[in-house]
Image (cartoon, rainbow, N blue to C red):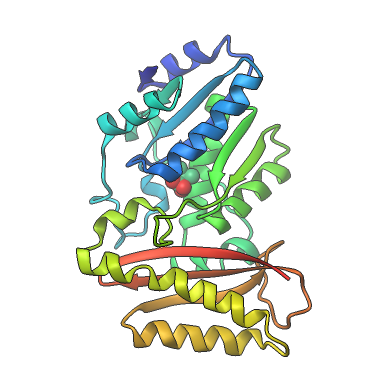
Amino acid sequence: MHIIHTVKELQEHLAKAPYKALVPTMGNLHEGHLRLIDQARERSQAHQGITIATIFVNRLQFGPHEDFDRYPRTLEMDCEKLERHGCDLVFAPDELELYPQKQSYTVSPPPELAGILEGHFRPGFFTGVCTVVMKLFSMIQPQCAVFGKKDYQQLKVIKGMVSQFNLPIEIIGLETQRAEDGLALSSRNGYLSVEERLRAIELFQALKSVCADVRQPDAKPQAICSTHTQALIDKGWAVDYLSLCQQEDLSPCTSINAKALVVLVAAKIGKTRLIDNLEIQL
Ligand code: PAF
């Protein structure tokens, strides 16, 4: 496996690759990321191509009071895991390599998709994500890129960007990987104390309860969301949102006529903010 840090080396390595499958990450890899790598590797092997992971903690997508500085940087361990999973190339640039000048050209996704939910609570987040992903796409020119459904809105935003810019890249969304008790795997789970980790499962339990309630006759989406938001607050969570949306465009679900729904949640336990979601097919 090659580990490279510069765009020049990257392009030398990629020059002859017939097919490139990409997994963009911010590192601190867990089983969820490794499933994305497995999927990318299956794709690339089917096309005699290569599997590429990028590791870059992207300052542009962090707000001023977020965890950019303390976000775990674990390059050596990440590379060992990637190698075990058959990744061919890791691109891990430093900030100056990816942003040699202030990044004044950015990609701004539409507010109706990117200004709600995560975008409402983390202004600028999706512009930061789209800008770095667009840069990585243009440096690597992959044929496919794999993202996790855990970041459900991010996956939608990236699919929209790829479609509207006519990028010839297949975007693959993979199911959320969960710990045995159901907690969605996330690099930020590492911030949880032992006691918080035990309680963190309450988030997934809330999603499952919403899912069960939505299936009841005469279900009222807003009332269901309010009830489960309040239940989380009563348990000590600071809830940013718990929303029932249409899968297609993440618009709010106002009545249970639609068939393909998704419930999304973001909430803080102690100082740690977690997100999760569950698709609901009625
Ligand atoms: O999902 C992530 O880890 C990041 O948002 C991404 C897609 C690697 C962009 O920095």
**Location of residue 204 in the rendering, given as x and y in whole percent from the top left corner:** 46, 68
Above or below for 248 versus 218: above
Q: Residue at x 38, y 42 (%)?
A: 26
Location of the N terminus by quadrant is top left
Q: Residue at x 38, y 23 (%)?
A: 83
Nearer the observer, 181 or 275: 181
Q: Which residue is drawn at 56% across and 66% down?
A: 115
Image position of 14 (left or right of 239): right
Camera sees residue 266: no
Above or below for 206 versus 234: above
Q: Residue at x 77, y 73 (%)?
A: 258
Image position of 5 (left or right of 72): right
Indicate the quadrant where residue 214 lies. bottom right
Image position of 64 (left or right of 240): left
Camera sees residue 171: yes
Indicate the quadrant where residue 203 lies. bottom left
